């Protein structure tokens, strides 16, 4: 685990991620995460819904060309209806931004979340 970097996520955003994952289950939800990247931490301030055509179809289908050219996007969040908190090969191949947040079924609490850097190293998640 890369403990040097902490990812700070407001409680409301955590709740929104968990609730949408729950309501779209068994489909996959995807969000873009907007925020600020510092040397030792990444502060998430907002979640953005990607273009609707891709919604619920899986993270790997999020087309790069539809991504907003927006450097305040620090990463993505997506759900794993399978219940696994681990990243898949597809996740790593399609990493956008600095971090990837994964919400795993049954989406009940922070225990169902994990955050990784783009190389797949687990980062520390702090709810603010
Ligand atoms: Zn995934």
Image (cartoon, rainbow, N blue to C red):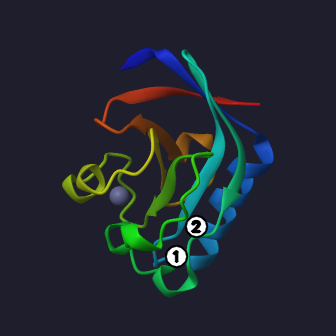
Please provide percent x and percent y for residue 121. Answer: 33, 30
Residue drawn at (45%, 14%) of the image: 3
Label annotation for residue 112: none
Mark number for residue 25? 1
**Residue 85 in the image, given as x and y percentages of width and height:** 38, 47
- For disc 1, the neighbor class at 10 Å (few under 14, some 14 to 19, many from 20) is some
Relative side of 30 to 38, left or right? left
Q: Secondary structure at mark 2?
A: helix
- Does residue 98 appear in this view? yes
- What secondary structure is marked by label 1? loop
What's the residue at 26%, 49% (across, down)?
Answer: 92
Q: Mark 2 and mark 1 in contact (Cβ < 8 Å)?
A: yes
For ligand 1, the image quadrant comes to bottom left
CA distance for labels 1 and 2: 6 Å
Number of numbered discs on residues: 2
The residue at 52%/54% (across/down) is: 77
Q: Say which residue label 2 marks.
A: 21
Q: Residue 32: where, in percent of width, then height?
A: 57, 58
Quadrant placement of the C terminus: top right
Is any atom of residue 109 visible in this view? no
């Amino acid at each position: 685990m890369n403990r040097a970097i902490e990812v700070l996520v407001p409680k409301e955003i955590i709740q929104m991620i968990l609730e949408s994952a729950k309501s779209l289950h068994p489909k996959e939800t995807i969000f873009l995460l907007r925020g600020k990247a510092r040397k030792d931490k990444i502060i998430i301030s907002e979640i953005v819904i990607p273009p609707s055509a891709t919604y619920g179809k899986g993270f790997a289908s999020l087309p790069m060309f539809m991504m907003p050219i927006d450097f305040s996007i620090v990463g993505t969040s997506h759900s794993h209806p399978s219940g696994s908190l681990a990243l898949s090969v597809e996740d790593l191949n399609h990493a956008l931004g600095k971090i990837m947040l994964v919400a795993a079924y049954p989406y009940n609490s922070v225990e169902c979340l994990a955050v990784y850097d783009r190389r797949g190293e687990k980062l520390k998640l702090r709810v603010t």
